[in-house]
Amino acid sequence: MAMDVTIRGAGIFGLSVAWACAQAGAAVRVIDPAGVAAGASGGIVGALAPHVPENWNPKKAFQLDSLLMAERFWAEVGGASGYARTGRLQPLPDADAIALARRREGTAAQLWGEAATWKVVREAPDWAPPSPTGAWVWDDLSAHLHPRKACHALADALRSQGVDIVAQGAEEGAVIWATGVTGLEALNTGAPRLMGQGVKGQAALLSLDKAGAPQLFADALHIIPHLDGTVAVGATTENTFEHTQTDDRLDDVIARARVAVPTLEGAAVIERWAGLRPRARSRAPMLGPWPDRPGHFIANGGFKIGFGMAPKVGAVMAALVLEGRDEIPPGFEVAASA
């Protein structure tokens, strides 16, 4: 059977685009020599958290839409993705932080409407990080999943729909490049300036069962209670690095997480992870036609928000490739990073 769409890359963007195309009735093949979730999408943190509700722009609006699509998206995928919309708590360190959070309550009501809530709370579960002021920000828009498991659940769902996921294969139909850091490196070749690069991240998985509890953000760390009885902590943002293995920067992350959340003290570290996440120069996902390559398209640059953006990235790319309908927000076009 001839393919309507060929997708290069079996990370979260490639698989989500494949899912949207297959749901629209297209014949799809996914090609990745390294296999499913072999790159940054094989991580362990999986915070699906919104930007702060202020200074609204197309990127934040797109992210809001995608976060609200996520529950239905992952329910339709099925399997052990680890998706749960359990909200997020952040301690407020001083009176100025409380005042700012209060102002954001109002902007959240305007921008998020009734879809989600952002508010200052004075009571929190014992899992919450201690707060010097006795106050925390609570939002119920934040969700989380297990990135690696979510990708494999999505790949299984695609196979059940007849989608081939192979190491090698012919390119047929429209070709969508969702190849992460290697894809950015290809775009950089011959470009007048850097279009994107890999940014190293490190994270750890601890053995502690807090399934169903809200995720935490403290000391600039995401602390995620996965549904499988583990807690992920991370991640670093390293623009310069000597290697892509874990090192003492991850030791610092683990130590800081245990100080911020005393409940983590004594929890055994069961996995250490490091990888390169693809960041476009624009800092937004890079979506749309590949300039000067007719019939080829790009879906890249998810960086730290790729899983949260994925449901809508898939929908937008499927609409573009299958229907010629361009719903790509300003600043997301490939030219924005050129």
Image: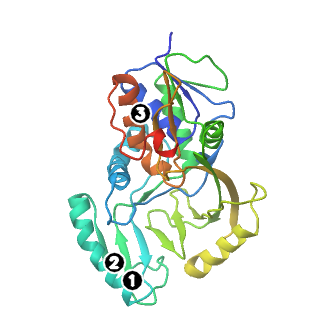
- Looking at the rendered structure, the kind of residue marked 3 is Met
Q: Quadrant location of residue 261? A: bottom right
Q: Mark 1 points at which residue?
A: 97
Name the residue nearer the viewer: 101 or 191.
191
Residue at 66% x, 72% y is: 254
Q: Position of residue 140 (x, y in %)?
A: 34, 64
Name the residue nearer the viewer: 88 or 170.
170
Secondary structure state at the residue bearing disc 1: helix
Q: Position of residue 276 (x, y in %)?
A: 65, 51
Name the residue nearer the viewer: 268 or 174.
174
Q: Where is residue 63 in the image (x, y as percent from the top left)?
A: 37, 52
Residue at 42% x, 25% y is: 22
Query: In the image, is 17 to the left or to the right of 116?
Result: right
User: Does residue 132 appear in the picture of this structure?
Assistant: yes
Q: Quadrant location of residue 178? A: top right
User: Does residue 135 appear in the picture of this structure?
Assistant: no
CB atoms of marks 1 and 2 within 8 Å: yes
**Dot 2 surroundings within 10 Å: few (below 14), some, or many (20 or more)?**
many
Q: Earlier in the sequence, mark 1 or mark 3?
A: 1
- Residue 230's label in the rendered image is none
